[in-house]
Amino acid sequence: MLEVERINSFYGKAHVLRDLSFSAPGGQVVALLGRNGAGKTTTIKSIMQLVRPASGTVRFDGTPITGLPPHRIAKMGLGYVPEERRIFTDLTVAENLLVGRQPPRAGAPTWTEDMLFDLFPNLAERRNNRGKALSGGEQQMLTIARTLMGNPSVVLLDEPSEGVAPVIVEQMARVIQQLKSEGLTVLLSEQNLHFAQAVADRAVIIESGAQVYHGTLEDLKAHPEIREAYLAA
Amino acid sequence: MEFFVAQILTGLANASSLFLVACGLSLIFGVTRIVNFAHGSLYMLGAYTGYTFMQVLPGAVGFWTAILLAGLTVGLIGMLVEMLVLRPVYRAPELFQLVATFGVILVVQDLTLMIWGPEDLLGPRAPGLRGVYRIMGEPIPKYDIVLLILTPFVALALWYLIARTRVGVLVRAATQDREMVGALGVNQAWLFTGVFALGSALAGLGGALQLPKGGADLLMDFTILAPIFVVVVIGGMGSLPGAYLAAILISVLNVFGVTYLPQSTLVLMYVVMVVVLMIRPYGLLGREEVAGEHGQVGEPETPIKPASGPVRLMVIAGLAVLALVPVFGSTFAQVLLTDIVIFCLFAASLHFLLGLGGLVSFGHAAYYGGGAYIAALMVKHAGSPMEAAFLLAPLGAGLAALAIGWVCLRLTGVYFAMLTLAFAQLIWSLVFQWGEVTGGDDGIVNIWPADWLNGTTIYYYFALALSVGGIIVLRHVAHSPFGYALRAARDSARQAEATGIDTRRVQLVAFGFAGMMGGVAGGLFVFSKGSVFPNELEIVRSFDALIVVFLGGVKTLAGGVAGGAFFKGIEDLLTRFEYWRLVMGLLIIFVVIVAPEGIVGSLRKAASRLGILKTAEQT
């Protein structure tokens, strides 16, 4: 369960998030939608405290995490999968997973290297290859696997479908559904509405850093004018 | 052949201490991105604490235990330094931390002097290893043999730690992207402290291990600094096998150098470094530095603007006071102020390069001392009049800067900084060892100004006019189209190039120009003192300027001048006390922690918060 309450974030003088509030109920997949530059990545970074909100509160399972260092938040069970992958390119696949490893946690599934290699068979073959030798899709899988090694109960996925081949996008959708079936809460930022529709239960739309829509995906499907107003290019 | 083998064995033995110290430095840099100038001080502390432990602990077991304890103690000291001095400034602008480490050097120097006294300590011989082994008939000290066998094992243990353990994996991951490591649940703060402690412990071990070979003295911190930087750079920043290879290369070369080219031992190391970096810009086993990959996002630079009316009035008033000093001030005040204005020009010239160009030079003393030496050499060997010699100082320094800049600008960031340091050391060692021409350590004396300038007051006016003039020229250039191009190249080289700016040429011209202005300061200096010694070319002099620029404020135009005036003034006050280094070091650390924007930058922030000064956005 993740709650964002009236957060305001800045880059220097630029006001990026404006009184943004929404929540991701436990066990659900929530899609954070919005145009390029709407503030999706900043939202995710503000939850993780990689960007410090100037005001407002982020709660994780009821505990305020605003102001905590990112490593403490990660240890509480909030998994972060960054945009543009950011794997450790000089480390092997196995070593990348080792960086993410955390002790098992009550109330969240425990992952092992073997389970993740089952989930991402391509990675198993490349176990001892360095990160820089992987394809874009493989790197994307590795970032997710690396975060899962921390046994999170909530996962933040920043644009998982960006810049990867359609076949990988499909695989990514299956992975997200599996995470949901394991009881994880997922918040993913997306520009690809089709992808969001395939995996998400709820949608939050932001525009210029403020929330403009919050509801179920069925509801969003029933109101094409909202999609038209905020998501159409 | 026998002799040859013996030489190589000696070189390998010498490499062991160098390797330990250098790989500690490399490790620290790799993870924390801190250029730890205080690493030589940790090495010195290792030697001194090791000496004390050896006095207390008897026998062979005691000897080796003492070495381990020295490593541990220095590791703990390093940990304290990291937690107390460096942690508060991790978020400061890039490379600012090195100023803090310089403060640590000064503090350690005086503490060592207080605890162990000024006498050099003769290192105890290793019990049971006093004699020599005969290898192919040549005598090799037993201790050397032990060292050269031991080192690969230490290297192997380190390699295992880094390559095979989870801690090592985390360290390597943090080298690449520390923010991501933190977001995965690893407390980077402790990782940094741990790495700093380990690196320090290695320096301490290195210091203690070389006791039987070299003893302990108060100069060893700076003596080791240049070689370990060279080793780290040749090996490749952050690469342990690279550091090992480079330590061996340098040590073996040095042993042969002593035998065959005794006048060139100091120069040799830097020549090797320059050659290696020309062929492999990132060292033997280093990898290319990609800017911005470490998640370090600084605040955007505020645009500079011409001084406002009130500021101009203040400057004019200040100059009027300076001009009136000979009327009411003592001769001493004039001499001191001459020193200060010259130093301000020197600092301003480095600030131009560093603040506006983003080009961090670790060897700016080369142009200051170089200018001074050119003028002095002209007077001494060519008998040229003062005026001609004085004109040749900036000219020669500028040309040297152009040539050196042409080579150094092939690299960026820390590699650029190191290469500038190497060239400065190259020039220093040339001057130091080429005694017939430069007088070596004895310097060049009796270099007095022309008759019309002979006199404290008239020379004060001369120095004041030229220094202030030089500073105004530097400011003027900063506001000229060239200054804009230079800042564009600093902020975004690619974008600058896309708008038609030849960034390398702009930077090269800036490097030459800054060198030339440094040369003016050097020329002024030599005629004010009547003599010049190699220490005007030393690392310490380059560091002086760096510190002053950083503490004054890199991002403000007045930073170099303000820092120069402030610290030269304070230095004059403090040097009257016995333990002035301690006070100065603590002061530097204090300023670094409370005013990470530098003196001018922090004053300006405070002023704009109070509404005295308008911020750039409002105007």
Image (cartoon, coloured by chain):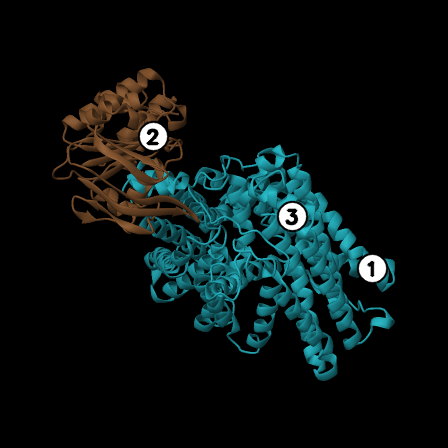
Chain colours: A brown, B cyan
Location of residue B10 in the rendering, given as x and y in whole percent from the top left corner? 53, 46
Q: Mark 2 and mark 1 in contact (Cβ < 8 Å)?
A: no
Q: Which residue is mark 3?
A: B423
Q: Which residue is mark 1?
A: B389
Q: CA distance from mark 2 to mark 3?
A: 59 Å
- Left or right relative to A96: residue B604: right
Please tell me how crowded label 2 is: few (under 14), some (14-19), or many (20+) other residues with Cα within 10 Å. Answer: some
Task: Tell us which disc is closer to us: 1 or 3.
Answer: 1
- Left or right relative to B271: residue A12: left
The secondary element bearing badge 1 is classed as: helix
- Left or right relative to B542: residue B444: right
Q: What's the amino acid at mark 3?
A: Phe
Instruction: Pick the quarter of the image with the N terminus of chain B.
Output: top right
Location of residue B123 in the rendering, given as x and y in whole percent from the top left corner? 46, 62
The correct choice, above or below, for A173 with respect to A205 in the image is: above
Corner quadrant of residue A48: top left
Location of residue B258 in the rendering, given as x and y in whole percent from the top left corner? 63, 49
The correct choice, above or below, for A113 with respect to B524 in the image is: above
Location of residue B591 in the rendering, given as x and y in whole percent from the top left corner? 47, 65
Task: Depth check: give the residue in front, B229 or A97.
Answer: A97
